[in-house]
Amino acid sequence: MPLPPPRSARKEPLVRLRPLRALCGTAALALALPVLSPGQAAAAVPAFSVYLQNYATGLNAAAAGGTVAAHNPKGNEDHQQWVPVAVDGGHQLRNADQSNVCLGRNGTSAVTAGCGSAGTTWTITAGADGTWTVGVPGASQYLTGSGSDAAVQLGSGGDLARWYLTPVAQATAPMPSADTRRLDQVTFLTTHNAYANGADGNFASFPVSLFPNQNLGINRQLNDGVRAFMLDDYAVSGRAVLCHNSCDGVSNPVPLATDLQRMVDFLKARPGQFVTVFLEDYAPSDVLKSSLASVNGLNDVLYRPDQEGVAVKGWPTMADLAARGKQLLIFSDRTRSADIGAGWATRDTFGVLYQREWTVENYWSMGGGIGSSDWSCYSRWGTGRPLTVDSAAFHPLFVMNHFRDYPIGSTIETDNGKLLNRAQNFCTPAARKKPNYLAVDRYEVGSPSPLSTVGTLNTYVLAPGQ
């Protein structure tokens, strides 16, 4: 099994998801191996590079200077890749990019040790939902996860003692036909702060007024192939309007309804197209409801998965949505409990879904506007809802953010050109699912372009587990 590239080669394209016919030897063998998925436990311990990923937290076990710590998933950059190797009495977990370094134990602590040392043999046992336990041979002690940056310990069991052996090399299958592909199998180009574009009106407060997230207006975004939009809405004079951070000093904020009308008109003219709106939502629910009610034709195209049992039976096919004219999905980042606590009506009573009930999303920032970036991929909402959340029937949609604190032109162009690499080799294994939404600044720049990256992701799905 070849080792991953050195950390300095992070930005170079890796080969994990190229077609098998383009590979040979051990690289082809790695891609031919099955992906472990929730609900499917393998009969044999994998013999290829994996991430030791905690079921309860989504964090990875990383070799950290003699200890083993729970870290945010970070691809090949943080000594998080392990190779299970059969030995007398069980298995060793050998670090993939450090010679003669194995997962070991010292009392109740997980440590790293030379692979010839005592305490580096483990009993790896398949469990429910594609998970495994990593136990001490002959004892009821198990490798047990912890919070971010905390030491991994030994414990007596429970969900923190359940681990995914997530393959580093994800196997793929061709995208299903247009008649059978489901919503959760498709990837959509998404614009971050889509309204902050300098083209649709005077609404952007500092710093967005100086550093717009997008260069082109909503209609142009739609015509160019953008199919999901991140919008920040606030209540001003009884209506929902679009601002960033606040509406202070914004003389003429554009109403949310204006941009939603643009989308509805586009969809009405193009049957079969599908659009998603993500609201960073600061408006009271009655204000939001009133604003949506002013959008002509919105209810005709609005899709209501909450009324169709999707949370139990899974997402429909894109062909089914097209046949029924259901073309628009709206999410809010507010929580149901926050609305109830404020004495407001819940948003799903008028068709706006609570995003945390339907999606997972990685933390949004890769760092400042210039300089190095952080490619770690972990939940925006903490370990209580890790990116790995899944079930046999219902697969949460995965929103992958790929942008920085401040949109600086040259940095965005560089970052967007690396979107495919991060999506495939950092965020897909971190979530154990392919991104459904790729959110970027200035979608029209970068090589390959974000639209091209979406096209690549829409040629395949992750292969089912065996």
Image (cartoon, grey):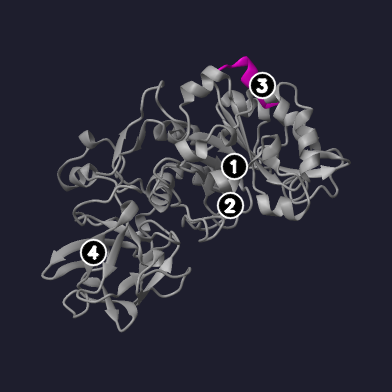
Marks 1 & 2, CB-CB < 8 Å contact = yes
Q: Quadrant of the N terminus?
A: bottom left
- Residue 300 is marked as 3
**Mark sitting earlier along the chain (1/2):** 2
**Residue 268 located within the stretch drawn in magenta:** yes
Marks 4 & 3, CB-CB < 8 Å contact = no
Question: Which of label 1 and label 4 is nearer to you?
Answer: 4
Helix or strand or loop: what does disc 1 sit on? loop
Question: Which residue is label 2 attached to?
Answer: 404
Q: Amino acid at mark 4?
A: Ile
Viewer-closest of 365 and 350: 350
Question: Which residue is label 4 attached to?
Answer: 124
Magenta segment boundaries in residue numbering: 262-271
- Residue 441 is marked as 1
Q: Position of residue 262 (x, y in %)?
A: 70, 25
**Mark sitting earlier along the chain (1/4):** 4
> What's the residue at 64%, 38% (across, down)?
214
Cα–Cα gap, marks 2 and 3: 36 Å
Cα–Cα gap, marks 1 and 4: 43 Å
Quarter of image, res 445 = top right
**Mark sitting earlier along the chain (3/1):** 3
Viewer-closest of 32 and 356: 356
Q: Position of residue 102 (x, y in %)?
A: 24, 71
Left or right: 448 as drawn, with respect to 300: left
Left or right: 462 as drawn, with respect to 389: left
Viewer-closest of 371 and 65: 65
Farthest bottom residue? 107
Helix or strand or loop: what does disc 3 sit on? helix
Viewer-closest of 448 and 236: 236
